[in-house]
Structure formats: C-alpha cells, structure tokens
Amino acid sequence: MVCKKMSLIFNCYIFYIFQATLTCCSAMDMLEKLDVLEQTLTQKMADLKKGVTALNNENNEERLKWNDLENTISDQKRRIGEIYNSLGKEHNVEDVKSNSSFPNSNLNESIKSKRASTTAPAFYAYMSSHELNPGKHHTLHFDTIITNIGSAYNRYTGIFTPTVSGTYVLSYSIKPYVGAYIPIELVRNTQIIGSAVTKAQSSYEHGASSTVVIQLSAGDACFLRTSNTYTPSGHIYSSTYARSSFSGWRLI
C-alpha cells in the first residue's frame, strides 16, 4: 500500500515536471515569435517612414514647380495687358482729327474726351460670379466692367495699367464665402503694395476692403492676387447680394 502511494506521488511529480517543461517551451516559442513579429513591424515602419519622406520631398518639388508656373502665368498676363494697352495707344487724337466722318461740331468734344481718358484713367469692375477655391499666388479677374475710362483695365487679365504717370487711388473689396479664409495682396509689377485678409466664420461672413494711394508710372501693372505666403481656403463670394470688386483712378 505504501509502495502504491509512493508510486502515485512519483508519477504525479513526473507529470508536473513534464507540464512545466511544456509550458516553458511554449512560452519561449511565443517570445521568439513575438520577437520576430516585432522586428518585422519595426522594419515595415522604417520602410513606411522612408516612403513618407520621399512623398514629402516630391510634394515640395511639385509645389515649387506650381509656384513657378503661377509666376510665369502672372508675368504673361501682365505682358498681355501691356500689349492691349499699347494697341489702344495707337488710336490717338491725331487719328480723330484726320477722320473726315466726324462732323466739325463734334470734333472738339471728341478730342476733349480722348484727352480726358488719356490723362485721367479710371476704372471700376467686379466679379460676375464666385471665385471657387483660388489657390496661392492666383491673380483675381474682375470680369464685369462698369467704368473703364482710358481702357487701362483689362478684364481678361485682371490688370490695371495706367497710361500716364501720376498719383493714383486703388481700392478693392473682397467678400468670402461662409467659412472661407482668403488672404489678398495688391501688387504693382512684382511689389506688394497692399494686403488684406478675409476670414469668415461658420455662422457669418466677414469681408475685407482696403484703399491705397500710390505714385504710379505709365506702364505699371497693378492687380490683385491671393497670397504667395499663406494658403487660402474656401471661395470668394460675389453676387447681387455683395460684390467683390476692384477700382482705381488718377488723382493728379
């Protein structure tokens, strides 16, 4: 009887050791598997970081190319405006004098009108519709012209090019869509001469306007654009309810 009990105790002891050995082996296997999994995940994370870095570099290069294209477009628009204005200068007062179709009674009035438009250019134009999602360094076009004495403003390019040097007043008003953020710059050739920002909250709209008095030379290109530094978001609003507009005139 004692031998049976001793045998039973010995068998239980052997079974316990066997189970402990299996558990230890299973734990070691699990740790090895976890270690391999950790190494694999670490390598994948490193590969993903390299991919993100490469994409960021590529994105930065594309942004630089985009900015270069925007600058090129702005320069081309300015040159087109200068060409339009130079074409307009060809029709001068002498052409009016030599035109026999004008009655003598209207000749002086025609000459006076032409001289006034040449020496005192003035314009007022507004956007006929909303400007949707303008990007950085984007020239704004005010395509509906109400006043354009001297034809110094070009609605296709959005550029005002004075035909005579003098002191000018340039004024603009920009209204954002609800929730929009629109930083604006007033530019003469490549120089920023004025700026404003509109930042509409979700529940209301907040427009911005500004007026600049500046000495301009004949041939200067003046226009409005979105900021080249800060990225706009949302739309520029313009309708019968509120117009986004651009205007200017010569003082002296």
Image (cartoon, rainbow, N blue to C red):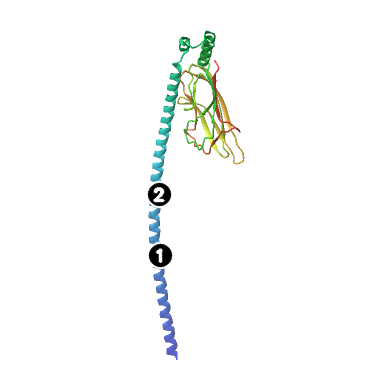
| 180 w.r.t. 37: above or below | above
> What crowding class fits label 2: few (fewer than 14 Cα within 10 Å), some (14-19), or many (20 or more)?
few
Q: Measured from the top left, where is residue 82 in percent x and y? A: 44, 22
Q: Is residue 201 left or right of residue 25?
A: right
Q: Residue at x 42, y 76 (%)?
A: 19
- Name the residue beneath numbered marker 2: 49
- Where does the image place residue 196, in percent across and percent down from the top left? 55, 30
Picture quadrant of residue 89: top left
- Judge the density around disc 1: few (<14), some (14-19), many (≥20) Cα neighbours within 10 Å: few
Q: Residue at x 44, y 90 (%)?
A: 2
Tell me the residue at 42%/30% (across/down): 73
Which dot marks residue 31? 1
The residue furthest top is 104
Q: CA distance from mark 1 to mark 2?
A: 27 Å
Q: Position of residue 244 (x, y in %)?
A: 56, 31
Residue 213 showing in the rendered view: no
Quadrant of the frame with the C terminus: top right
Could you tell me residue 100's position as x and y percent?
47, 10
The secondary element bearing badge 2 is classed as helix
Tag 1: amino acid? Leu
Residue type at numbered disc 2: Lys
Look at the picture and state if 103 lies above or below 1. above
Secondary element at image label 1:
helix
Is 26 situated above or below 190?
below
Residue sitting nearer the eye, 71 or 45: 71
**Quarter of the rendering containing residue 77:** top left
